[in-house]
Image (tube, grey):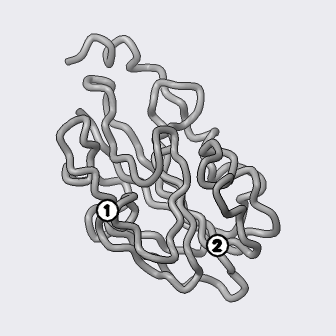
Amino acid sequence: MSIIGTLLKNRRAGEAGLAWNLPALAAPRTLLLSSPAFADGAPIPFEHAGKRIGGSEASPPLSWSTVPEGAVELLLVMEDIDVPMGKPFVHLVALAGPALTALAAGALNLATAPGGVCLLKSTMGRGYLGPSPIKGHGPHRYVFQLFALAAPAAHGASAVDASPRAPLGAVRGPVLARGRLTGTYER
């Protein structure tokens, strides 16, 4: 067990800082977000873990139920709520068209993102950053959150390079629906 992980064992960001809890992103939970790689609350497979710990850092495949009429964009966010910091660690922020209903494994990686998917800045770079928690810190929960937006979020170079929380606070107009999926990872 890692000494650092042991010392920080009781320090966790918590769920309060999740994008899910931002007033601007409130909506009915009517989107069913799932992955064939792991069930809600189950461990994320090693192949989707971060390169820093030996994983391939390929984003897991994701799919979701039909987006409500009137949605013009989807916002997908992945956050680690068990990181020993003041706020959850943002592993992914992406925008996609409302006609999209699934993403293949690796589709959220910068080099392999399909057309129509815009990968914004996360806490460390752009695109999917796989789980790589501190060894010995205990299980970490990684929350994938999908929001169906009634108005487009900011685009362009300034949005791509903005801080990871900037697009979350810049959502204008109602969020029509949302869904979430939680995976775990421990070292």
- Residue 25 position by quadrant: bottom right
Give the Cα separation between the discs numbered 2 and 1: 20 Å
Q: Which residue is mark 2?
A: 148
Q: Is residue 43 visible?
A: no
Q: Secondary structure at mark 1?
A: loop
Q: Is residue 155 left or right of residue 181?
A: right
How many circles with numbers are drawn on the protein? 2
Instruction: Determine the residue positioned at 44% across, 20% down.
Output: 10
Instruction: Determine the residue positioned at 21% across, 51% down.
Output: 56
The answer to whether 104 is drawn above or below residue 162 in the figure is below
Instruction: Determine the residue positioned at 60% across, 71% down.
Output: 74
Q: Amino acid at mark 1?
A: Pro
Q: Is residue 118 left or right of residue 10?
A: right
Q: Position of residue 76 (x, y in %)?
A: 54, 62
Q: Position of residue 19 (x, y in %)?
A: 63, 50
Q: Amino acid at mark 2?
A: Ala
Quadrant of the image for the C terminus?
top left
Instruction: Determine the residue positioned at 53% across, 61% down.
Output: 94
Pointer 1 local density, CA inside 10 Å: few below 14, some 14–19, many at least 20: many
Q: Position of residue 39 (x, y in %)?
A: 32, 63
Q: Secondary structure at mark 2?
A: strand
Pointer 2 local density, CA inside 10 Å: few below 14, some 14–19, many at least 20: many
- Residue 174 position by quadrant: bottom right
Q: Which residue is mark 1?
A: 60
Q: Is residue 173 left or right of residue 65?
A: right
Which is nearer the eye, 112 or 187?
A: 112
